[in-house]
Image (spheres, rainbow, N blue to C red):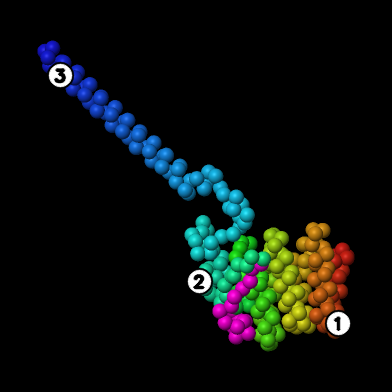
Amino acid sequence: MEKTLKRVVEGNCDQRTSAAAQIKQRTAIQRSKSTSSTSSPESVRKLHPRPSDKLNPKTINPFGEQSRAPSAFAAIYSKGGIPCRLVHGSVKHRLQWECPPENLPFDPLLITLAEGLRETKHPYTFVSKEGFRELLLVKGAPEKAIPLLPRLIPILKAALVHSDDGVFERGLSALVQLSIVVGPSLNDHLKHVLTGLSKRLMDKKFKEPITSTLQKLEQHGGSHRVASSVWSSLFKLISGEY
């Protein structure tokens, strides 16, 4: 009886010893994995971000995985739908077109670039702004742009009412560029941008650029009777009469 009890006790001890050894082995493996993961380059970057990571936090890789679905412009750009590429220079960036811009159809390219003005991350911000500007500089731009005004103005209006200051500034610049090209043809559409301009007038830092923009629009739009009421409304808006 004693021998039997002894064997049972010894068996239980062996099982406990074996179980303890297994637990120690699992703990060692888990610690090894934890140490490996925290010492990986990716983990080190997360714990100790590089100074360069802070230089342009809004820069993204258009071909990388995104945490959310890309915008229409970003998707088109990533798939090569914008026939130009960004060339990084030591002083400033520039665009390199795949073919002469004057050979490109304004519809839908100019519309797409206007949509891109609402982007807030690089390289989309630069590509849309510079692409829009350069396309309007080509020979025959007025004839190509005027028919697109009914579609361009709502897009520019969306940029002018955007909450991001950079988007608003790009919309303001694009509006001036468009007025230089299409001239008085823009007059009938100007009333649609009043809302965006009026909201930004409450911000002192934008009052001067908005005033300058309106003066340029008047200069390129002419002083004929069709535009007179529009300009009257615009300058009343600036002076605070509304």
Compute the Cα span from label 1 to label 2.
44 Å
Q: Residue at 50% of width from left, 45% of height from top?
A: 44
Span colored in magenta = 92-108
Q: Mark 3 points at which residue?
A: 7
Horizontal side, residue 4 vs residue 128: left or right: left
Q: Residue furthest top?
A: 2
> Nearer the viewer's eye, disc 1 or disc 2?
2
Comes first in the chain, label 1 or label 3: 3
The x, y position of residue 220, in whole percent, is 80, 80
Q: Which amino acid does label 2 sit on?
A: Lys
Horizontal side, residue 129 vs residue 236: left or right: left
Q: Mark 2 points at which residue?
A: 79
Whether label 1 touches label 3, CB < 8 Å: no
- Badge 3 local density, few (<14 within 10 Å), some, or many (20+)? few
Above or below residue 98? Residue 45 is above
Give the quadrant of the N terminus: top left
> Nearer the viewer's eye, disc 1 or disc 3?
3
Q: Residue at 77% of width from left, 66% of height from top?
A: 197
Q: Could you say which quadrant of the image residue 116 lies in?
A: bottom right
Above or below residue 39? Residue 91 is below
Above or below residue 106? Residue 91 is above
Compute the Cα span from label 1 to label 3.
112 Å
Q: What residue type is labelled 1?
A: Ser
Q: Residue at 51% of width from left, 59% of height from top?
A: 66
Q: Mark 1 points at which residue?
A: 223
Count of marks, rendered view: 3
Whether label 2 touches label 3, CB < 8 Å: no
